Structures are given as C-alpha cells and as structure tokens.
Amino acid sequence: PVKTWAEMPPPATNEEVLFPSEDESAGYVAIGWRTHAYNEFQDRAVAGLLWSYLTDSAASPLTEAFVESDDAVCSGVYPSANTYAQGSQELWFDDCEASALDDVEGMFIDVIKAEVEKGVDLERMHDVIGLERRKYLSAIEDQPGDTLLDTMIHHFIYGDRDGGDVEESKQLREALDFLASLDKAKKELDGPAWTELLRTSILEAPRVCVVGRPSAKLGRDMPAQEKARTEAQAKELGPAKLKEKADLFDNADKTNNVPAPEEVLTSLAVPDANKVPLFPLTTVRSLAPDHTPKVLPNADSDPKKGKKILKAVESGKGKGTVPFAAVQGDHLASEFIRLTCGMDTSVLTPLQRLYLPLIDEVFFKQAVLDEQGQQVSHTDVVNALERELVSYWSAIGYSGGSFANGSFGQYFFVVLKTERGKLATATKWLRRSLWQIQADPDRLRVGANKLLSEIPAEKRSGSGMCSAANKALNFDPLNSNHGACAALRQRRFLKRTLRRLEKEPEVVLAEINACREAYIQPANMRLQVAGDLTDVASGIYDSLNDVVNFTPPLVSAGVGPTAGLIATEPPRVATAAHTSELKQRPREERGLIMGLSALENSYMSRAAPGLKYGHPDEPALGTMIEYLTALEGPFWVEIRGKGLAYGSSLINREEQGLLNFGLYRSVDPTAAYDAAKSIVLEFADGTRKLDASEFDNAKGSLISGYLEAEGSKSAAFKQVRVSSVSSTNGWYC
C-alpha cells in the first residue's frame, strides 16, 4: 500500500508570513530545497558535510558573512535536514534586521556564488569531516540509544522492503554506518568535486524562500478578530447547541477523571535504586591551600581503582605550588577528556558584571598570541579549535544562554572536550582563551551587534520574559549575574557600549580587560578533568599548571595572571545574590504583569523560598513535587485536563534556594493558579489525602529521574561537577 507520508507535496513558491510582534525590528527567513531520497545515504551524508562547511563555526562562509561581520544582518544561520521518503533541506536566518528581510535570499546567493568561484577549501573540508567523526563517536559514547534509534525509526518508516530481508538488512547497515560515509567522502571527493556539488545542489537547485515579518498591527488586530470569531461562532451555534457542547465537555472531563484501576497502578514494582548499577566513577579532589588529594565516597566505584588513581595523583603532586582554588579528577573509562574551568564572578563591580554577556559572546572568537608570541587571527583561532577539539564553549552559569544564566549563575564556565590522550591540547586552548587573547574593538562591535539582534526574539518569548521578570524581583540587580545579564537591561547597555566603541574604544577595552582580570585568576578557579585518567593521573597537576605557565615570548609581552594571586584558602560556594528588599515591599509590589502582543496566551512564573543543597527535607520535597506534577497527577488533571493551561511546572532550584511554580500557554492563568493553590492547601490541611499507589509511583518516577540524570558518561561527569561547585559529596546528586 502507498504510504501517505511517502507522497510528494505540490511545488512551492516564495511566501511572506506575518507574525504578531510589538517589536518590528527583526524577523526570520527560511530557504528550502527538496533533496535526496531516504535510501541515498552517501549523498545525504555528503550534503550534511557541505552544510557544516558553510555554517558550523564563526569562520564558516555563511556565518562569517551574515553573523560575524560588520555588515551582519542576523544572529545565526542554521541548516536543518528533514528525513522523508524524499528529503528536504532548510536554511534558517534567525533575528534578521527587518530592513534586510527582502535582501537575505539575494545575499545568500552572492555568498554561494563567491564560494563557487573561489572553490571549496579541501583542507578545511577535511577538518569538517574530522570534527563530524569526533562528534559522532562522542554521541555514540554518550547517547548510543538516541543516535542509533533515530536512524532505525527512519528506516522503519521509509526503508525499501521490496528486495527482501537480505537487501533490507544491507540497507539498514549502510544507514547506520555513518563513519564509512565520512571515510568515503574524504577519500573520493576532491576540491573541484565539492565545488561542483555546491553549485548544483545549492546554487542552481530549485528553492523556495519564506520571509517571516513582524507586525505590530497584526498584534493589535488579532484579539479583536478572535473575539469576533468566538462571538460569531456562539451566535451560529445558538443556546441549545452551546449547552450540548458544554455537556459534552463536562462528560469528557468526568471520564478523564475516572481513576485508573488499582491493579494497573500496582502492577509494576517501584524500582530498587540499590540494584541499578551506576557508572563506577572515581573522584579525586584537592582544595586550597594544601591541595591534599582525597577520594570522594562512591558506592559504585572500584576501591582498588580508586586507590590506584589516588596514588598516581599523589605521586605527581610533588612539592610545587598548586595555584587553583580546587582541582578535581573524575576517572571513568572514556574515549574523551573533558576539561572544565569554573570561575567565581562575585568579585566584579556592577559595571564589570554588565560586560559578562559580551565577554562570553566573543570568548572563542578573538585573535590570540601563540606560544612564540605571534598573533593568530580570530578566523585561524576558530578553525584550529574546530580542527583540534570535539567541542568547546563558555557560559555564564553552566549551559547558560546569552541572557539567561545556567545553573550556578555566579560562575563563568569554560568547557573543552578533546580525544583521550590530548589533555595538553585542552589546557593549551584554555590558557590561550584566558590570558593570550588580543582584544579588538572590531570583534567586540560584532559581538555586541549579534547580542542586540537576539533581543527581539527574547522579548517575544513568554517563558523567557516571565523568568527574567521573576529573577529581577528575586535577585540583586547590581551584584547578581541574573540581574546584570537580563535582555532588557543588556539592550540599553549594549547600545551604549557600541556608541562608546566608536568614540573611545581604548577606554572600553580597558574596562573589559579589567573585568577579565578581576575574575580570571588562578585563586578563583575550580578545575575539573574528567575522562579516563589511567595515563594522565600522575601528571594531572603538571598538566593543569600549564594553564598558568607561559613561554618567555609571552612573559615579555605581559601575558598571564596577576603575580601572587594564588589560592590561600578553600573555595567558598558562590550563590546568586538575592535582593534583601522583596519581603519589605508591599504585597502589590512583589509582582510584575507584562503585555506581549506576540503571544496568544499567557505565562506565569512565581517563586517562594525553597530548599538548598543538603537540606534534610529535600528528598521529601522532591517526592511531593513528583506526586503533584506527574502525568495524570493532581496538577495535570486540574490544570491541563480542564484546559486552563497547556502545562505547569513546580521546581526546587537548590542553588538559588527558590521553589518555582510556572504556567505556560495558559488561557486563564488566574484560574490555573487558583487550581494549583487549592490542591496544595487541600493536601496541607488534610482535606485531600495522598493515594498510596500514586505516592509509590511518584517515588519510582523520582528514582528514575535521578538515574536518567546519570544515564551517560558526560551526565555522570556533570553531576560530580555540580557537587564540586556546590561543595557537596561527589555523589550527593
């Protein structure tokens, strides 16, 4: 039988789509092509490599032209391949200047034409292939299920079964062997062949362009149009039909609330966490001032291996000074090494703190001095990082965004991942990015413009603006990164910085350098090396000390940390600075209401004091949260089940010490909040009783969540990294 999803859609034409937005400064552009059939595995892999070559870094042709230049018109260029019987390829231009929306397609064609005339750089293409190989092997180690299952599901839907089982098995093996496709592409395609593919598959292939244009008028008109529509529908249905529909809804709601049979809920036993083996991870940690290495307790680690790693670490420490606040080595069999540096930014002044998003944006996109004192351009830096590492990033808070800090938001993190046996490569690039950068007003200008181009999208995000407003109420705007990095505050600061870069660039450079020097100091650093430490444990301190050891040409150039600033006491835990005024304000001043015309529904974010790391009631609170928010649990039934909101959340944020309640895509946030409040109060006063089987299921779900949080090697390393920053036991989480 013919599969409906295998049928080809009709030809498409260019279109413009309006979307509601009070801010009309930025929109979106998407260009699309029809591409290869599902079973053209090699062609699909080659196409993916070509798009990576064009977009994967700040030095890629499209990213450099559209994002990382003085003439930048958008905040990002992202390819997206869709796998169907006949595939499609999309290229998205995010946050484009409204004045340039109609020009983006033409600009794109000009860039591709220039690349065709210049020819594909075969050396760089081979670097792209090498990086894709390393990324794939990393994904296989960390997420083997997701990495392989997606391919198998696509095969199940689109695979050709006409050739029998043998032919289908051969096809599936080919689909799964991505590394063979990479090897074949590197071996068989030379520069002219890649250039010809660029010309025929992208430049000359039929395409369609869709422009998403912001419209304040549409935002004003939509509420009236929706009101008129519902009134017209009510009039058309009439009282009798409306009552019939209301009865239909009420009956459906009653049916939905019928409890599941007890035997179904109790048919699966609550998992015994003690029977689930975790990764046998060995953690060795040393703290200033003496840096005596100690093994942290972990029931699943191999004691013999732990003693061996500890002995190796102790043997390599010697009598030399360890300048860092904390050093942690996490051993687990892995083909990759992760180097993480966390730096406390609490020492910054309010003005310095405002520079953090800009410093983060350009962190790996600036020229550096190499070890011979020669300047390496920012383009060559980016290309070298792509060639030598698996991944690299910096963030304010772990995994934070431009304007939303990640966990432990008072820290600035730098994370580098490389292949096993190449720790020296990671320490080299950490040293270069910390102390050997050559700040340039032009790169700062490009970075500031990129950040500004992202702000309109932030302002259209209901959840993002809710979170930002909540943090503005709960955290000190001067001494907390949550306040300093908020999009609306950064918008004014970045515009002012751009004006100053034109008038007084040297003053701005001096302020940024002073900010970097304030928190980028060995005494302020927590360093973690995670991976297979078998061959590097004895040299871990020497390797990390290379981060602060400089060759004579660099020393003469004044490169390096401030002399004498080494850690002389154990590191303290840097937590977000809460405002001290909130409880003193009148109740009506403890909240904010914002109108966003880009949204058709509402969002809510509320905060109350929560439990911090190590509180004895944390397990109980976690279990109760799981009980309340479970699928078909109390919140689900009373909020989502009754159509009050698409979803709700209740989260205890240990590092912030806050308990957050959230609603998203709510048609009636007041009613949804009242429903949640009633549920909690009824449990508190005993009106509503806990169901024993549902409570057991909540405990099982919580255990499953904890196990899933450590479900891969990188996830396990992340958990012990959290313990390092929070100064808890290595396996507290």
Image (cartoon, rainbow, N blue to C red):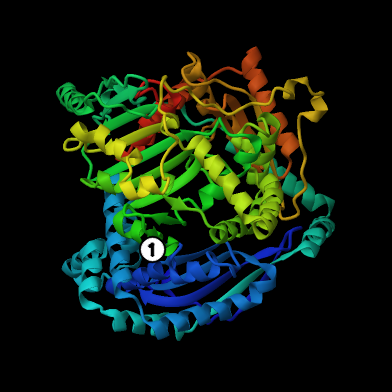
> Residue 157, position in %: x, y?
35, 64
Give the vertical position of 7 relative to 144 (above or below). below
**In this rendering, does residue 267 appear at all?**
no
Residue 496 left/right relative to 96: right
Side of 186 relative to 641 (left or right):
left
- Figure check: 226 above or below 190: above
Q: Quadrant of residue 701?
A: top left
Is 325 displayed left or right of 258 in the figure? left
The residue lying at 65 percent from left, 72 percent from top is 101
Horizontal and vertical percent position of residue 515: 56, 40
Q: Residue at x 31, y 22 (%)?
A: 291
Q: Which of the image's four quarters has the N terminus? A: bottom left
Q: Identify the amino acid type marked 1.
A: Asp
Q: Which residue is mark 1?
A: 380
Q: Report which quarter residue 35 is drawn in.
A: bottom left
Above or below, 606 relative to 414: above
User: Quick one: SS at disc 1?
Assistant: helix
Instruction: Let me know if residue 137 appears in the view.
Output: yes
Most foreground residue, 344 or 475:
344
From the viewer's side, name the closer residue of 611 and 625.
Answer: 611
- Percent across and percent down for residue 711 are 33, 37
Q: Quadrant of residue 609?
A: top right
**Residue at the extreme front:** 556
